Image (cartoon, grey):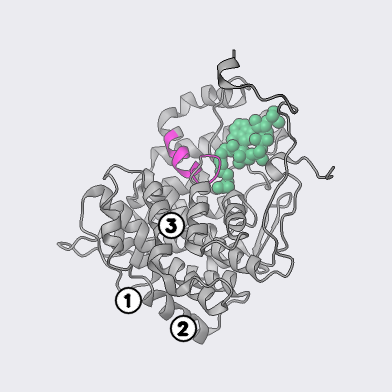
Amino acid sequence: QDIFTYDPGYMSTGSCKSAITYIDGDAGVLLHRGYAIADLAENCSFLEVAYAILKGELPNQAQKEKFEFDITRHSMLNEQINFFFRGFRRDSHPMAVLCGVVGAMAAFYHDSIDINDPHHRMVASYRLVAKMPTIVAWAYKYSLGQPFMYPQNKLSYAENFLHMMFATPCEEYKVSPVLARAMDRILILHADHEQNASTSTVRLAGSSGANPFACIAAGIASLWGPAHGGANEAVLQMLHEIGSVDRIPEYIKKAKDKDDPFRLMGFGHRVYKNYDPRAKIMAQTCHEVLNELGVHDEPLLKLAMELERIALEDEYFVSRKLFPNVDFYSGIIFRAMGIPTQVFTCLFALARTVGWIAQWNEMLTDPDQKIGRPRQLYIGSPYREFVPLNKRA
Ligand code: CMC
């Protein structure tokens, strides 16, 4: 009889060694490659952080420029993918489209799928990071019935994404530097978060030697759920449902009621038992973006801040150490930027692709790497005699 630990939800299982991201959940600390998330969000571009996550060190000037050049030159999609999009219903959820299109990349980019070749792995990684903004923007354009906008090499990563989302062939979209910077910062805040559900999914899928694009599609599927990346969409739905400050106590009561499945979305975290450091930066970015857009007294922001205040004074949330997480304020920023609710989780996936592919690379170069294969406690019937169909009750 094998001996193993029963650990539902892997609450106490360390599944790998990793040098990418460090979290101290009790202290509210998040480091990528040793750098504090606040320093990275304040001083770096998303591509600088992506470089560090992928390669271990922040780039110097020459490395930064080369990386930006390489990513920019990979941002176009094989034109055939254009037709792949057209197979979807126009009202498909963009996460369903994203999952399908990223999985389909396995069929389009055959020259980067020898996972034992470091060059192939690097090309696959660059392709994923470079093409995700194009795929997300096209999923949105497709839902509107508008023409796809192609990436432009003169634009930065965040500018390009906003351009592909909001420009049309009839009208230039002037990307505000403040909004581009905010988008860049939001991407940094979502870039990696060690062994969360979607990253563990990518690692588990990849542990069998599967195609990298297919592994990332698996990560996207896992991220979609409301307990994970889907929470940013769910927060906005919840705020709309609450509607006004006077109804907050009613929803706090529902969240505490164990017979009611309702939870405060954007609250709580498996690892953080303190304020999520990303949520702090997100709240600050939210104020900056609304200021830039001239949106004063945004009712949803007021509602969110009041909800946070009331929850953090409530014994239920205090005793369980439930604080706002990264998803609590991000939806309000996205909405102010004009991004529709259904695209929120796609933005999370866009940013997290860097972490997923870096973790996939790290796993494949780890000498301890083995196929992931959890065990189970069998609770079904013991052996019994087979009953032919005509004798069954
Ligand atoms: N509202 C009300 N109660 C909650 C909440 C919440 N948002 N989160 C946890 N609890 C309670 C839970 O009922 C349990 O209470 P008790 O001890 O009385 O049974 C206790 O807090 C511990 O919760 P848990 O479900 O055992 O904790 P977990 O680590 O398994 O779950 C979580 C973590 C993030 C799934 C959960 O907090 C949750 O569902 N939050 C809402 C969804 C959300 O915001 N998700 C985004 C997470 S951060 C970004 C990301 O990972 O993508």
User: Residue 246's mark?
Assistant: none
Q: Is the residue at mark 3 in contact range of ligand 1, meaning its CB lies under 8 Å from it?
A: no
Q: CA distance from mark 3 to mark 2?
A: 28 Å
Q: Is residue 202 left or right of residue 69?
A: right
Q: CA distance from mark 3 to mark 1?
A: 25 Å
Q: Is residue 292 left or right of residue 50?
A: left
Kind of residue indicated by mark 3: Gly
Tell me the element at label 3.
helix
In the picture as drawn, the residue positioned furthest to the left comes out as 170
Q: CA distance from mark 2 to mark 1?
A: 13 Å
Q: Residue at x 56, y 23 (%)?
A: 254
Kind of residue indicated by mark 2: Lys
Q: Quadrant of the C terminus?
A: top right
x and y percentages locating residue 198 in the rendered image: 56, 51
Q: Which residue is mark 2?
A: 66
Instruction: State ligand 1's quadrant.
Output: top right
Q: Are marks 2 and 1 in contact (CB under 8 Å)?
A: no
Q: Are marks 3 and 1 in contact (CB under 8 Å)?
A: no
Q: Residue at x 29, y 55 (%)?
A: 85
Which image quarter: residue 58? bottom right
Mark 3 residue crowding within 10 angstroms, few (<14) / some (14–19) / many (20+): many
Q: Which residue is mark 1?
A: 153
Q: Which residue is mark 3?
A: 103
| Magenta stretch, residue numbers | 226-237
